[in-house]
């Protein structure tokens, strides 16, 4: 039974994988198979920005940084001037920052870097709230990338 | 336990597992981008692998569920269910241990899924069910061969 079951299981995995790839190829919702977060963001029309770009845009009027991590993480340390808009508490937090976000010419969202998904989740939720793709950007390296460059951080709770 | 009882318990257990896996797979298939975000939240995989997993995993769940439901390749479906649940327990367990406050994404993106701790305990129950059904399947086959 075990040998037969293992062979069947391999067949099911192969069949499922083949169907998944086929569906992904044919579906308009299909994901780019490589490229990770950057590819998903590009599919949503949201661009990624590098550390140098973040520093450049922060010198321009109308740029707002959004920290998509939890309030506890934000209080421990965030990029100076960033607003806290946690993905997990987006709806109750949004009204507190809405006015400033609506006045922004560029909103750069970040989280914990690497494969953290909260920045893209917040970007998606801002899109749903009517923010244009051209106003939204994600800083993929996030706070760790900022700290690696030995740039200053600020601590304390948000507004 | 008689053969008739064993047969029905195994069948009902398989159907229950099939329903669980189908309920988990369909929302993920319909929202691959959302599921990719959920996978990324676990911070387990390299970023480049997240989309591939989000594309393949729900279909593997769905095909496994169909095997459980129809009885075609039922042993394979049961082994797959046990393996997947073990993987989910590992992913949820490490997220729980690391204190990650994330949506488990178990039954689709942004569907008010359980917290990581609750999802872990729920998957543990599913895993026990899947293990029990696998044992019942083996017993049923042995009884059939002995007749």
Image: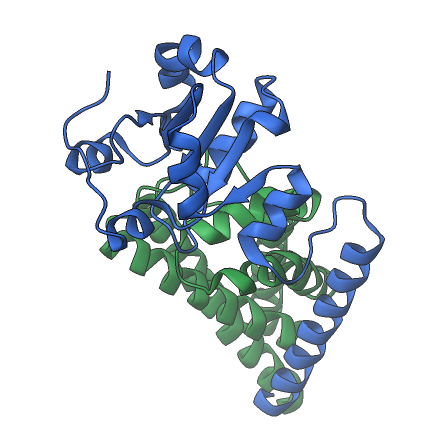
Chain colours: A blue, B green
Residue depicted at 57% across the width and 88% down the height? A2
Give coordinates of residue A143: x percent, y percent.
30, 45
Image quadrant in which you'd find residue B23: top right
Residue depicted at 53% across the width and 24% down the height? A126
Question: A147 left or right of A137?
Answer: left
Residue depicted at 47% across the width and 17% down the height? A104
Question: A123 left or right of B118?
Answer: right
Q: How many marks?
A: 0
Relative to A82, does residue B129 appear above or below in the rendering?
A: below
Which sits in the foreground, A136 or A6?
Answer: A136
Q: Residue furthest right?
A: A26
Question: A138 left or right of B21?
Answer: left
Which sits in the foreground, A120 or B54?
Answer: A120
Give coordinates of residue B47: x percent, y percent.
49, 60
Give coordinates of residue B70: x percent, y percent.
75, 63
Image quadrant in which you'd find residue B30: top right
Which sits in the foreground, B77 or A144?
Answer: A144
Which sits in the foreground, A63 or B70?
Answer: A63
Looking at the image, can residue B73 be seen? no
Is the N terminus of chain A in the top left, top right, bottom left or bottom right quadrant? bottom right
């Amino acid at each position: 039974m075990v040998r037969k079951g293992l062979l069947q299981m391999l067949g099911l995995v192969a069949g499922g994988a083949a169907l998944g790839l086929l569906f992904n190829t044919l579906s308009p919702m299909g994901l780019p198979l490589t490229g990770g977060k950057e590819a998903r963001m590009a599919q949503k029309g949201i661009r990624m920005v590098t550390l140098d770009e973040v520093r450049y845009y922060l010198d321009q009027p109308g740029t707002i940084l959004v920290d998509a991590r939890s309030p506890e993480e934000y209080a421990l340390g965030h990029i100076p001037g960033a607003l806290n808009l946690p993905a997990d508490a987006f709806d109750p937090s949004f009204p507190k920052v809405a006015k400033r976000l609506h006045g922004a010419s560029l909103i750069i969202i970040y989280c914990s870097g690497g494969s953290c998904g909260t920045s893209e989740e917040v970007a998606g939720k801002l899109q749903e709230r009517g923010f244009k793709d051209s106003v939204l950007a994600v800083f993929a390296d996030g706070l760790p990338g900022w700290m690696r460059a030995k740039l200053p951080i600020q601590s304390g709770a948000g507004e | 336990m008689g053969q008739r009882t064993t047969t029905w318990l195994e069948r009902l257990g398989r159907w229950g597992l099939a329903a669980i896996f189908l309920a988990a797979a369909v929302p993920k298939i319909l929202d691959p981008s959302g599921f990719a975000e959920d996978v990324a939240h676990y911070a387990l995989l390299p970023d480049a692998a997240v989309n591939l997993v989000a594309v393949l995993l729900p279909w593997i769940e769905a095909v496994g569920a169909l095997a459980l439901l129809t009885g075609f390749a039922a042993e394979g479906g049961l082994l797959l269910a046990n393996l997947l649940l073990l993987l989910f327990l590992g992913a949820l367990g490490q997220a729980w241990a690391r204190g990650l406050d994330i949506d488990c994404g178990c039954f689709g993106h942004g569907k008010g899924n359980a917290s990581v701790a609750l999802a872990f305990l729920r998957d543990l129950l599913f895993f026990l069910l899947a293990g029990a059904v696998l044992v019942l399947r083996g017993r049923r086959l042995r009884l059939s061969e002995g007749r």
